[in-house]
Image: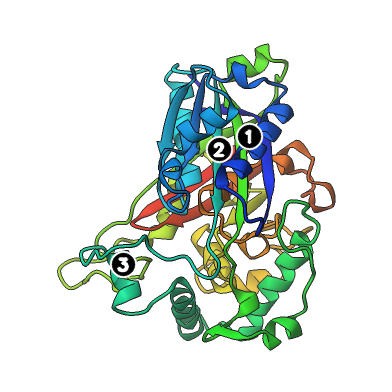
Amino acid sequence: MTADVAVLGAGMHPWGKWGRNFVEYGTAAARAALVDAGLDWRDIGSIVGADTVRGGYPGYVAGATFAKALGWQGARVASVYAACASGAQAVATARAQILAGLADVVLVVGADAAPKGFLRPAGGDRPDDPDWLRFRVLGATNPTYFGLYARRRMAVHGDTLDDFAQVKVKNAAMGALNPNARYRKRVTAEEVAASAVVADPLRLLDICATSDGGAALVLSSMEFARRHGAPAPARIRAVSTVSPRFPNTVLDLPDIATDSAVAMEPAEETFRAAIARAAYEEAGIGPEDLSLAEVYDLSTALELQWYEDLGLCCEGEGTKLLHEGATALGGRIPVNASGGLPYFGEAVPAQAIAQVCTWQLWGDAGDRQVEGASVGITVNQGLFGHGSAVVAVR
């Protein structure tokens, strides 16, 4: 049995601040994906929803919520929550159902209506919850973490504020061409430098906003794809969902501390590097085989870190890769040809699904098209050790 599953359709609700319910965004994305796949909702054997904790009770059972909105038709239903990795975990669930023979066609949907400002934990007192503690005891919002990580790169690798700004300039050139992006304006390094400091050393244009948005995929078995008239579809070949190893010596949210390495040696690779390695091993490829990558760039500094964790360059050489133009459109390995999170913003359950939307592999990305795109990787991580990466091929 092949481990591949076909991607028959993809759809999005544009990112922004629309002031409406998340169900509307997810339903719009789902219907767009069904149209793209040439299928009717009644053809779907299972629906997997990526949950949002901000949608009230319906957000916690997103699969059933979207199934009801589309019209009850008896499909299997599942709901998945893994913070920012929710979308990739939903893809993994759908893929497992298909490979297990439980459904021929699965609809994956994620959507969010994010708050204004930074994301914060759910209400209530939870002194045993590290996410609650970092906000209430340390006052460490997400931008604080982004700033700490940027400072780490500056101290360890010599990265500069201008290096970070050039990441934004590069992504802005591609995001400005994306009709689903929230922001559609190119920026200069000078404009990044002039924007307000949010969490030193990062400026407003170095980090991503919170957003409303939705994304959906229609996945199927390869046999169904052939019967449906898609003999050579884009395919998902691997989904990595690994967790960290003890001791973890590089801090990751929500823990603003690292495990002690006194008792034992740290793992040979960091958590982020392990996410990518597991995906490469499952897909039978290496970083040299990639045509493009979509990475979880909550900040410009974190994008540079992903270059190294994905094996696109050696440790400490992320800025060198950037300045060579390798990660820009037309470069050796374009990264975030969508524009990335700073040009979309965080719509948490939707973003890892949006990363997988395979228009690049279909050759349908318009002015953002990566020439000859045939292998792509997406990578992100969620709170509490949820790693996720997806490898798609054509």
Front residue of 389/340: it is: 340
Residue for badge 2: 109
What kind of element bears circle 3?
helix
Report the residue marked by disc 1. 30
The percent coordinates of residue 55 (x first, y second) are 47, 49
Q: Amino acid at mark 1?
A: Ala
Q: Looking at the picture, does residue 141 appear above or below residue 360?
A: below
Mark 2 secondary-structure assignment: strand
Q: Which residue is at the far top?
A: 227
Q: Are marks 1 and 2 in contact (CB under 8 Å)?
A: yes
Between the C-alphas of marks 3 and 2, the distance is: 28 Å
- Label annotation for residue 132: 3
Q: Position of residue 35 (x, y in %)?
A: 73, 28
> What residue sits 79% from the left and 53% below the top?
368
- Which mark, residue 21? none
Q: Position of residue 276 (x, y in %)?
A: 47, 51
Q: Secondary structure at mark 1?
A: helix
Amino acid beneath label 2 = Val
* Closer to the camera in the image, 294 or 197: 197
Compute the Cα span from label 1 to label 2: 6 Å
Please indicate, yes or no, whether residue 281 appears anywhere in the rendered image. Answer: no
Which is nearer the eye, 167 or 215?
215
Mark 3 or mark 2, earlier in chain = 2
Q: CA distance from mark 1 to mark 3?
A: 33 Å
Q: Residue at x 35, y 66 (%)?
A: 254
- In the rendered image, the vertical position of residue 231 relative to residue 114, given as above or below: above
**Residue 306, image x, y percentages:** 53, 63
Contact? badges 3 and 2 (CB < 8 Å): no
Label total for image = 3
Write down the quadrant of residue 70 in the picture. top right
Relative to 121, is 214 above or below? above
**Mark closer to the chain start, 1 or 3:** 1
